[in-house]
Image (tube, grey):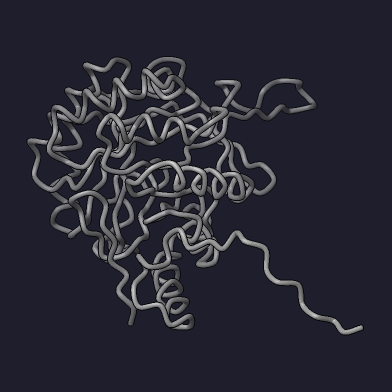
Amino acid sequence: MADLSVRIGSLTLANPVIAASGCFGYGVEYASSVNLAALGGVAVKGLFLKEREGHPPPRIVETPAGMLNAIGLQGIGVHRFVAEKLPELRRLGATVFVNICGTTIDEYCEVARVLSDAEGVGAIELNISCPNIKEGGIQFGCSLIGTHEVVSAVRKVTRLPVIPKLTPNVTDVASFARAAEDAGADAISLVNTFLAMAIDVETRRPRLSNVLGGLSGPAIRPIAVRMVYECFQAVTVPILGMGGIQTTTDAIEFLIAGATAVQVGTANFVDPFLWEPLIAGIDAYLDRHHIERVAALVGQVETSSPEPAWTGF
């Protein structure tokens, strides 16, 4: 059996497979069907300082090869999470990544402080990239200066690994990865969903109450792989890659492109039992290719042109 462990800042994960934020609730909802301790990590639903309602329905729409959502970051708030959900996650042995949100830098910092004082939090995933709310994170995530400022501020108030989640809705994502690294990020997480829209042609109305939403699922995977590859060339910190991963092959593609670990989101709605086969599939791939450590696979994409095969005269 290969060594599946990976390092994310000061954190060691048992394997590189993480349940993505927004698609796995607070983790405890899946505890009866998924061994949370067997996952590399669980990234919980985004948390503001206070509870948040989110957008009214309809807020999820299926699209060809994907899903469009405008949940609006509904959540119970960081204090209720620490009191109600974190103790159970700790009991279940989960490695917990807490996705945090804010409308101001001060709010991000306060949420980070609360989590830093709580037992059982492994890392903070800094959500500066949600495309379907009009205030807060995305304003920072689409500005190089804003990205640097919010990452730097949170870095100063917590000892936990800080992992900004970057938006793909920019022209040069690698420059944002560099800004995050320069500000003290321990790793970067990408990609969040792509800003998108769907219209009911019979009523001529948007299918989402928020009009716009975030596109996830297999439709975005090749773009996400490209962005992970670009960021791997630009930064030295680990990358948590995501975007349309459904199979072992999908996950390994991200690792080869430069991701140290992967997050799986939308596919969990289709098959909540995918986790064990996915992890076993990565192990089988490493065995088949005689690779002893999954970390040795990271960034090993061969981009040079192969020698043309000789076909005779």
How far across and how far down the image is residue 216, in percent? 55, 42
- The residue depicted at 53 percent of the width and 43 percent of the height is 227
- In which quadrant will I find the N terminus? bottom left
Q: Residue 118's quadrant in the figure? A: top left
111 relative position to 125: left or right: left
Residue 248 placement, left or right of 108? right
**Could you tell me how many numbered marks the image carries?**
0
Q: What's the residue at 52%, 27% (across, down)? A: 57
Above or below for 151 versus 254: above
Residue 97, horizontal then vertical, whole percent = 26, 45
Foreground residue, 305 or 231? Answer: 305
Between 259 and 136, the residue placed more toward the observer is 259
Q: Quadrant of the C terminus?
A: bottom right
Which of the 4 image quarters holds residue 74? Answer: top left
Q: Residue at x 76, y 21 (%)?
A: 204
- Is 272 on the left-hand or right-hand side of 88? right
Task: Measuring from the top left, give residue 61's x and y in whole percent.
Answer: 60, 37
Residue 161 lies in quadrant: top left
Residue farthest front in this picture: 313
Left of 103 or right of it: where is 269?
right
Q: Is residue 58 visible?
A: no
Residue 244 in view = yes
What percent of the width, then of the height, locates residue 277?
A: 44, 72
The single residue placed furthest to the right in the displayed view is 313
| In-front residue for pair 107/78 | 107
